[in-house]
Amino acid sequence: MINLIPLPVKYEEKEGKFTASNKVIIYADTTLKTSASALLELFSKVTEINPKITDNRADANIIFKLVDNIKKEGYTIEINSENITVCASEFAGAFYAVQTLRQLFKLDYQKPCMTINCALIEDYPRYSWRGLMLDESRHFFGMETVKKLIDLLAMHKLNILHWHLSDNEGWRVEIKKYPKLTEIGSKRRGTHFLAWGRRDDAAVDWTPYSGYYTQDEIKEIVKYAQDQNVMIVPEIDMPAHFGAVLAAYPDLGCRGLQIETPIMHGGEKNGPGDLIACAGNSDTISFLYDVLDELVQLFPGGYFHIGGDEAPKAEWKACPKCQNTIKSEGLKNEEELQGYLSNKMYHWLKSKGKKLIGWNEILKATSLERDALIQYWHPIRDRRVEKWVRENGKVIISKHQAFYFDMPYAMRNLKKTYNFEPSKCKLDENYNAIIGVEAACWTEWIKDEDRLFFQLFPRIEALSETAWSPKGSRNYANFRLRLEEFVEVLEKLNIPYAPLNITDTGLIETLKTSKTFISQNAHVEYEKVKRNKQEKR
Ligand code: ACM
Ligand code: ZN
């Protein structure tokens, strides 16, 4: 069994062995030089062998060759007893070849392995979209955690970080034209920590909470990600999940109510109800255009996410401006008003060379422009998505059943995540509609990096295999065996992953079917594991 995660398309073992211990001299064709440097760095960190890069191909025993008949992001590695030849047609493929070599030589293990079997590897991804969504509105993790996460995504051959930068509980990015977004919207008086069902004062930690990225920091993170073939897709959620904006600029809401940046996840008890951006107010549209204008400069990737999920329409039903717009634009109802707003964003983004992405609820408006991209998260079957696909629409699969990594393991165990087959979402594979998969990590109840990584690992390993490896090669029992060895990497990198004795079942005894269920039990799992670990030390 070859111990690689994600499993490559083809691994064919050959006679003989390659030994690196006496000589690692790397040569790379110009376009692939950064990959050569990355490999050099990995070898340098863990061995005594003093690896080198050479400009003379004849001196080298690890060679990166640029060839043009290799699939996008793919590579081949030929290992014989004398040398290793990596072929790729672009930076991304060579980068992923390095990640594979890194695992073969066990460069992140306690004991690297300098002698490996001769083999021929051919590899390329199943899906072009292989992502993770991180919610930094509910909790803000900051640059170092995000960089660490990018390293880990890249190591697993994942290539998208979808960055949820705004929500009710906090706005997390500097916008120069609207300073109150960060002066007011990035701060809240406390944090709801107990459970969805508890809305009393005792459920709030009254420590003031704040955090945001400056535009310079965003640029630094985007560049850091690009160097590892990770595209960052920003999300500004609209028209709902808009509380932090409304705290800063109340006039953008239907009633102009002055609120504080919300503390309670899921809405304040006795609060003003589900506030939402006023889609009938031209100032709201101008505001959104301005925000998008600043953000598209910072994120060079081709996509922009406008959220669009969970948008309650009571405010719009009672708002004269929203109702006027419905009339003047000849719209059928409030859902079509959301479609009107989405399409405005679609055209604005298109004029900047960006494609719009939205959560699957944006399909409630039948008028949505056809080449928007839909992120299908909802656990319940959504026939609108099926229709969208029949009409050639494209989809990213993020189904809650498998890919909501903030859920407790007891509810969404690793096997469930691993065995979830994207093409089984009643979306006929023949339409070629699924461009990829993306997991989501919402952070209402996740307040620090330790807990974040506990929720993510080893689920990211399962995700990487769904996203990258051929459908026919996936097998949970085999994955689980490989994972038992692979967790040594997480140990060595000091990632506080969930131990394998709980990932398959979760801590069942903590499972309750109550409103406190998700938040409480995920937390209990984490706390128990942490305690067990400390007791063992
Ligand atoms: C979502 O989970 N509201 C996209
Ligand atoms: Zn309104």
Image (cartoon, grey):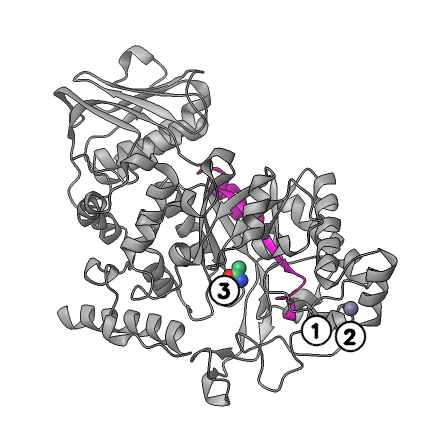
Q: Secondary structure at mark 3?
A: loop
Q: Is 518 positioned to the left or the right of 212 in the image?
A: left
Identify residue for label 1: 314
Residue at the location (29% across, 25% down)? 52
Q: Which image quadrant for residue 117?
A: top left
- What is the spatial separation of the Cα atoms under label 1 and label 2, in whole angstroms? 7 Å
| Circles 1 and 2 in contact, beta carbons < 8 Å | yes
Identify residue for label 2: 318
The vertical placement of 284 against 346, above or below, is below
**Image quadrant for the N terminus?**
top left
- What is the spatial separation of the Cα atoms under label 1 and label 3, in whole angstroms? 30 Å
Q: Is 227 positioned to the left or the right of 180 in the image?
A: left
| Circles 2 and 3 in contact, beta carbons < 8 Å | no
Q: Secondary structure at mark 2?
A: helix
Expressed as whole percent of the image width and height from the top left, the position of residue 465 reads 33, 42
The vertical placement of 42 against 384, above or below, is above
Q: Is 384 in front, or is 488?
A: 384
- What is the spatial separation of the Cα atoms under label 2 and label 3, in whole angstroms? 34 Å
- Mark 3 within 8 Å of ligand 1, using the beta carbon: no
Identify residue for label 3: 140
User: Label 2 is placed on what type of residue?
Assistant: Ala
Q: Secondary structure at mark 1?
A: helix
Instruction: Give the residue furthest to the left.
Output: 16
Q: Is residue 445 magenta?
A: no
User: Label 1 is placed on what type of residue?
Assistant: Ala
Q: Is residue 240 magenta?
A: yes
The vertical placement of 422 against 204, above or below, is above
Magenta range is: 217-243
Residue at the location (49% across, 56% down)? 381
Residue at the location (57% across, 48% down)? 374
Other-residue count near label 3 (Cα within 10 Å), few / some / many at <14 / 14–19 / ≥20: many
Foreground: disc 1 or disc 3: 1
